[in-house]
Amino acid sequence: MIRYIRRAAACCLVLLVALLLNAARVQVFQADSLDNNPANRRKNIVRYDQPRGNILVEGKSVTGSKDTGEQLRFERTYTQGPLYAPVTGYASQTYGTAFVEAAEDEVLSGTDPMLAPLPLWNEITRKQQPGGQVATTLNAAAQRAAYQGLGGRRGAVAAIEPSTGRILALVSSPSYDPGLLSGTGRTVADTWSRLNASTSQPMLNRAIRQTYPPGSTFKIVTAAAALDAGVVTDVDAPTDTPDPYPLPGTRTSLPNEARGCADASLADAIRVSCNTVLAKLGVDVGLDTMVGAVERFGFNDRDIRIPSRVAMSNFDTDMSKDQLALSSIGQFNTRATPLQMAMVAAAVANGGDLNRPYLVESTATKGGSVVSQTAPRSYQQAMNPATAMQLQRMMVDVVEKGTGTNAAIPGVTVGGKTGTAQHGVDNSAVPYAWFISWAQGGGAAGGTGTGSGGVAVAVVVEDAAARRADISGGGLAAPIAREVMEAVVGRGE
């Protein structure tokens, strides 16, 4: 009898050990996979059981949360959603997150270990901290000026503080209200489908995710390359350029829309925007030197983040001479985001030193204790300081007596460059209107910390409703840039 009891006890012991081993397997070794299983709703229930942390502009929240009383309790809300959508992105219980909502999700959701009062506190207690705060670098007045300036037309604006790289405005138009995607259900799904099916692509962040041919605004980069390489030693000297300019190795000649471009100096070519002079200079500089110069401005870099990913701006590294000529005036395969062209203007304004652009100033706990702070960092020395000084003078001439007079601000030093970018089959599509500029002035008008750092701006307008002859960087884009610059540096008079 005792023998049978022992056997039963041994069998129970084996079963108990097997049970413990299985529990360990489930709770330890499979914990992560079970946590992340799409069928496991507990993680989402915990995630939305508390308000999400807020995104701040000049210390004021542009986001919020509302208690729905449902299983996924708190939904994201947005103040002036369309105005800030290219920055905040969306935080949807159905479709996930985008832009700052995605890049800073751990802070905003309260899962970042840095929000905990002690190391490993979250792992030990299995508790989620209250959502933290994310302070952006935006200047509210500049953001509003850019949004109102575009007025719903397709296009984008990016503005940077040259001395730091702080992004002061980031606008894409037309926009959308991210709050409409926050919850669950048929209404959210229908809104998602409608926005994605729209021909105007309101959810496309044109400021950092769309690339365009930059047209004549790219001539600033080519001019910098020519000056740095010593191809041009005197910006006021004739360049020995015919008008029209025969593209090397072809029977095609490149014309000018401007007058007086034959044998024009570099300074005159920038002021009135001569295609021929800058195309020839690009060929004279040579492909390898041009590629090196262009990449110092950020072109061909796939790793730029602000912290959201920025689409790569392209300059081909393998071209024939005729293709190089066209690329040097912002055509052929040359493409750039508005943020990239704002970086070009910022490098000129900052004496040739290009700082990395960034959008998040700091993160903090719900109580305001700083978790992280972004410090300005140099990206590259885009050009020699002497070259930057010469380009500053030439860009000021564009605004004072050239194609960019619509960007002038009384009492403020403003430099700019217009651009009208051709595209489509045989350049038959309606051109894009570009303007890049910078302004240096006194204190900021309503901004935080911008001060005498000034501002660099890039504007692109895809105005398909305008007549082709009416499209120009100086006519459409320059007034928008002026309003953004005024919002940051004010009026000097």
Image: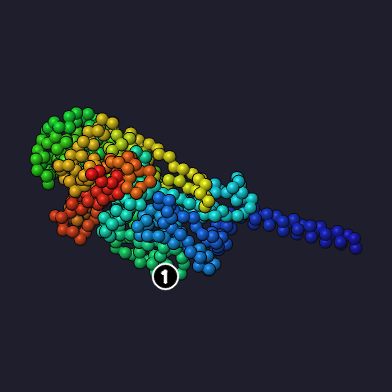
Q: Position of residue 421 (x, y in %)?
A: 21, 49
In the displayed orientation, state which residue is furthest to the front: 493
Residue type (three-letter) at the residue carrying disc 1? Thr
Viewer-proximal residue among 66 and 315: 66
* Residue that appears at 35% across and 52% down: 140
List x then y, in percent, for residue 230. 22, 29
Please tell me how crowded label 1 is: few (under 14), some (14-19), or many (20+) other residues with Cα within 10 Å. few
Asked whether the viewer can see residue 342, the reply is no
* Quarter of the figure that contains the C terminus: top left
Figure quadrant of residue 287: top left
Label 1 secondary element:
helix
Q: How many marks?
A: 1
Quadrant for the N terminus, please: bottom right
Q: Position of residue 50 (x, y in %)?
A: 54, 60
Answer left or right for 371 relative to 292: right
**Farthest right residue?**
1
Whether residue 47 is visible here, answered yes or no, is yes
Q: Is residue 379 left or right of residue 252?
A: right
Residue 53 rendering spot, x and y as whole percentages: 49, 55
**Vertical comparison of 371 with 19: above or below:** above
Q: In the visual, does 118 lie left or right of 381?
A: right
Residue occupied by mark 1: 187
Corner quadrant of residue 280: top left
Residue at (16% x, 40% y) in the render: 271
Image colouring: rainbow
In this view, the residue in front, 358 or 243, is: 358
Furthest-bottom residue in this view: 186
Q: Measuring 86% from the left and 59% from the top, which residue is drawn there?
A: 6
Q: Is residue 247 above or below residue 70?
A: above
Residue at x 24%, y 55% (from the top left corner): 462
